[in-house]
């Protein structure tokens, strides 16, 4: 009888865990923009990445409801996957776990090359305007960096807002990194993830159109960023 009770209890716990994992994450609050039309959503419920995810470099696979990306040494390049559709202003939300990788990023791009990204490491995250391509004289610019314990083996959730020339990343609805650069205010053609090393897990990826909040006051960011 005792064994049966233990088996029932374990089965109930396992079922609850599976149900919880399958449920989409709640939409966390935005700071400087309003969510509009949903442009893309993926909860990685299948056995393999959807066709929309172009696997340009590295190894990408669906594992227990998450997308895992790992660099392949012979590529001599970070692992890269991209999802192509047109947008200009957008809100991105996803959960992630660093599994020993050196760096990972959410990358935004257009027909000329890189636009910007949010870089994730074990100790911090950075909002950056990228160097578009090798031919341009424009340089990459780190706009803001915030310390964060991302190498703790736990899941974290990031909300990234890109509106006009502004990019804001908010970690776990608490820590904010924010920057402004004219190079961000362009039409964009895709977004994706990069991984240097092994490996990154992402899940509950969603992208919305974004519009500026009418009552957004940049001065309030001072309190949020400290």
Image: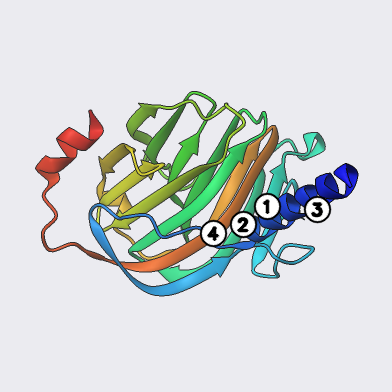
Instruction: Please tell me whether mark 4 or mark 1 is closer to you in this view.
Output: 1
Position of 137 with respect to 60 (left or right) is left
Q: Residue at x 48, y 37 (%)?
A: 119
Give the CA distance from mark 2 to mark 4.
16 Å
Q: Which of marks 4 and 3 is nearer the N terminus?
A: 3
- For the residue pair 78 and 9, the one nearer the viewer reads as 9
Q: Disc 4 marks which residue?
A: 205
Instruction: Please tell me whether mark 2 or mark 4 is closer to you in this view.
Output: 2
Instruction: Please tell me whether mark 4 or mark 3 is closer to you in this view.
Output: 3
Q: Earlier in the sequence, mark 2 or mark 4?
A: 2
Image disc number at residue 60 = none
Q: Earlier in the sequence, mark 1 or mark 3?
A: 3
Q: Residues within 10 Å of mark 4 (few under 14, many from 20)?
A: many
Position of 149 with respect to 37 (left or right) is right
Q: Disc 2 marks which residue?
A: 20
**In contact (CB < 8 Å): disc 2 and disc 1:** yes
Above or below 159: residue 26: below
Give the CA distance from mark 4 to mark 1.
20 Å
């Amino acid at each position: 009888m005792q064994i049966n009770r233990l088996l029932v209890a374990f089965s109930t716990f396992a079922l609850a865990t599976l149900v919880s994992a399958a449920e989409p994450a709640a939409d966390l609050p935005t700071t400087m923009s309003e969510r509009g039309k949903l442009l893309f959503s993926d909860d990685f419920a299948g056995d393999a990445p959807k066709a929309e995810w172009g696997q340009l470099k590295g190894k990408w696979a669906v594992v227990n409801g998450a997308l895992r990306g790992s660099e392949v040494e012979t590529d001599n390049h970070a692992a890269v996957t991209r999802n192509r559709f047109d947008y200009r202003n957008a809100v991105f939300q996803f959960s992630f776990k660093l599994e020993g990788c050196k760096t990972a990023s959410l990358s935004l791009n257009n027909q000329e090359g890189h636009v910007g990204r949010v870089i994730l490491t074990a100790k911090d995250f950075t909002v950056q305007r990228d160097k578009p391509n090798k031919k341009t004289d424009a340089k990459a610019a780190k706009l803001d960096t915030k310390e964060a314990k991302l190498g703790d083996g736990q899941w974290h959730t990031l909300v990234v807002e890109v509106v006009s020339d502004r990019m804001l990343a908010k970690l776990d609805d608490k820590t904010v990194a924010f920057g402004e650069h004219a190079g961000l205010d362009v039409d964009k053609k895709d977004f994706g993830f990069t991984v240097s090393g092994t490996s990154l897990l992402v899940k509950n990826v969603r992208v919305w159109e974004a519009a500026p909040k009418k009552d957004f006051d940049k001065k309030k960011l001072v309190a949020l960023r400290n």
